[in-house]
């Protein structure tokens, strides 16, 4: 029974209000929310971050160069498993992938240990559909810390589970790669994220256990997590909003650099089915798009969805905050008010 919550809130004023959510709670008997901290997670994340800081020190002063390159290599693999895999393929279905690519992405995704693809995609679909409400797992209106990591340190708001149950996940159930990864996650993940990353430097270039563990495993894992979390925190707080000025997600270059091209978050929340997850930006700030274009060339990725320029332009004019880039005077996209306000210096001088 769908209550009076709209199914696809595109703009902030279309999102369910607190009153609507309260009404919905009454109708579906969603339990009342009480903050419950999960201390096991708090302790594990404290250990991870202290270990990562020590790893950063060892990386600069002690580790072998090979170990540092190995950590960077694992970071890129993990990033692809999240961006090209869990995010653009499995959460948003912005393109289709042949079996070998899906297997590769699932392997990369397991290295990243951000929960299995099914759980990640389920939470992410709920995030997009109910952004900035109680039903959003990392609701950014609860502050930077909550949307960054706090949401992983406490039980989810009952509204997340109630609304999440209504999301269609049939495509994920139908993908044997996703089901296989989910079924064996607790066996595969420790090998992919912790054991193999530590073993390789020790076995192949005689690295010490301490350097391998703290640099290639702890530092690399914490770094990848934080770069991902910044999309939920920083990119929901800071940046321009050329496509929709009424929503929180924003265009954030810094986040795009650290998150393999996933910082163009205003565009992404407006057009989540675009495989580029951005309108503009070259491959330097969107390595995931470069990867997907190569995959499309060799036939592993197909049915790449993108948004026509006309549609983007109309949306910018209708809801944008006026920061959509123009190349200069004469660009047909230039804002009419900006043209009216522009001063012709020589004429101004003459008239004075
Ligand atoms: C991690 C995830 O870090 C990061 C995700 C980031 C997303 C970013 C998105 C940005 C865009 C893309 C950018 C990519 C950039 C990449 C750059 C790379 C460089 N719907 O969860 P439980 C139900 S993970 C429907 O235990 P609690 C369901 O029945 C880090 N139902 O809830 C479920 O059972 P099951 C490592 C839902 O008890 C049951 O509730 N991992 C939904 O409240 C219980 O679920 C960790 O640290 C839903 N959405 O506990 C683990 N959700 O699952 C952390 C739940 O069997 N997690 N249900 O169906 C936990 O310990 C717990 O989940 C908890 C909540 C304590 C947080
Ligand atoms: Zn998304
Ligand atoms: Zn978002």
Image: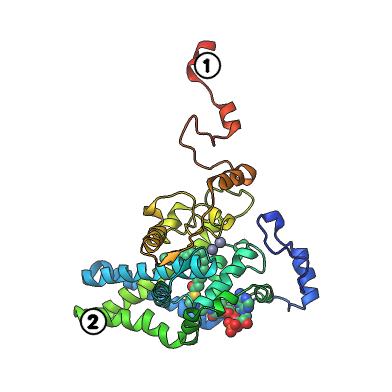
Quadrant housing the C terminus: top right
Q: Which numbered disc, 2 or 1, marks the residue that appears first in the sequence?
A: 2
SS for callout 2: helix
Disc number placed over residue 61 in the picture, else none: none
Measured as percent of width and height from the top left, residue 254 is found at 43, 54
- Furthest toward the front, the residue is 299
Q: Residue at x 53, y 46 (%)?
A: 309
Q: Circle 1 sits in a helix, a strand or a loop, which is it?
A: helix
Q: Is residue 144 visible?
A: no
Choose between 310 and 218: the one closer to the eye: 310
Residue 327: where, in percent of width, then height? 46, 36
Report whether 195 appears left or right of 244. left
Q: Quadrant location of residue 16?
A: bottom right
Q: CA distance from mark 2 to mark 1?
A: 72 Å
Residue at image location 50% in from the left, 30% down from the top: 330
Q: Quadrant of residue 133?
A: bottom right
In terms of depth relative to the viewer, which is nearer, 178 or 140? Answer: 178
Tell me if 196 is positioned left or right of 301 in this view.
left
- Say left or right for 8 vs 341: right
Q: Quadrant of ligand 2?
A: bottom right
> Between 220 and 326, which is closer to the camera in this rendering?
326
Asked if residue 24 shows in the view, the reply is: yes
- Vertically, is 123 above or below 198? above
Q: Which mark is residue 348?
A: 1
According to the image, what is the colour scheme of the structure?
rainbow
Q: In the picture, which quadrant includes the N terminus?
A: bottom right
Residue 171 pos. (x, y %): 57, 74
Query: From what the image shows, is residue 306 above or below residue 210?
Result: above
Q: What residue is drawn where x is 77% and y is 76%?
A: 28
């Amino acid at each position: 029974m769908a209550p009076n919550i709209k199914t696809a809130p595109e703009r902030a004023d279309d999102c369910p209000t607190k009153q609507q959510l309260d009404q919905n709670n009454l109708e579906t008997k969603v339990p009342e929310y009480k903050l419950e901290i999960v201390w096991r997670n708090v302790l594990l994340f404290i250990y991870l971050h202290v270990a990562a800081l020590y790893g950063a020190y060892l990386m600069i002063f002690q580790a072998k160069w090979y170990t540092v390159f190995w950590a960077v290599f694992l970071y890129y693999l993990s990033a692809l498993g999240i961006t090209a895999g869990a995010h653009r393929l499995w959460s948003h279905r912005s393109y289709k992938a042949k079996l070998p690519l899906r297997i590769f992405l699932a392997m990369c995704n397991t290295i990243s240990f951000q929960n299995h693809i099914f759980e990640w995609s389920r939470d992410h679909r709920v995030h997009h559909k109910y952004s900035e409400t109680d039903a959003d797992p990392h609701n950014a209106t609860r502050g930077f810390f909550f949307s960054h990591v706090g949401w992983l340190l406490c039980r989810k708001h009952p509204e997340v589970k109630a609304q999440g149950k209504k999301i269609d996940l049939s495509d994920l159930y139908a993908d044997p790669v996703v089901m296989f990864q989910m079924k064996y996650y607790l066996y595969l993940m420790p090998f992919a994220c912790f054991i193999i990353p530590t073993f390789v430097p020790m076995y192949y270039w005689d690295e010490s256990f301490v350097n391998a563990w703290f640099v290639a495993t702890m530092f690399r894992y914490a770094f990848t997590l934080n770069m991902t979390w910044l999309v939920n925190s920083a990119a929901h707080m800071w940046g321009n909003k050329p496509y929709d000025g009424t929503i929180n997600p924003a265009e954030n270059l810094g986040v795009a650099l650290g998150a393999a091209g996933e910082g163009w978050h205003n565009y992404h929340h407006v057009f989540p089915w675009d495989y580029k997850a951005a309108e503009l930006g070259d491959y330097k700030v969107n390595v995931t798009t470069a990867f997907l274009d190569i995959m499309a060339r060799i036939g592993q990725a197909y049915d790449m969805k993108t948004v026509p320029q006309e549609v983007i332009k109309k949306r910018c004019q209708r809801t944008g905050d006026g920061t959509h880039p123009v190349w200069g005077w004469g660009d047909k996209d230039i804002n009419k008010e900006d043209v009216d306000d522009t001063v012709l210096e020589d004429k101004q001088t003459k008239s004075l």
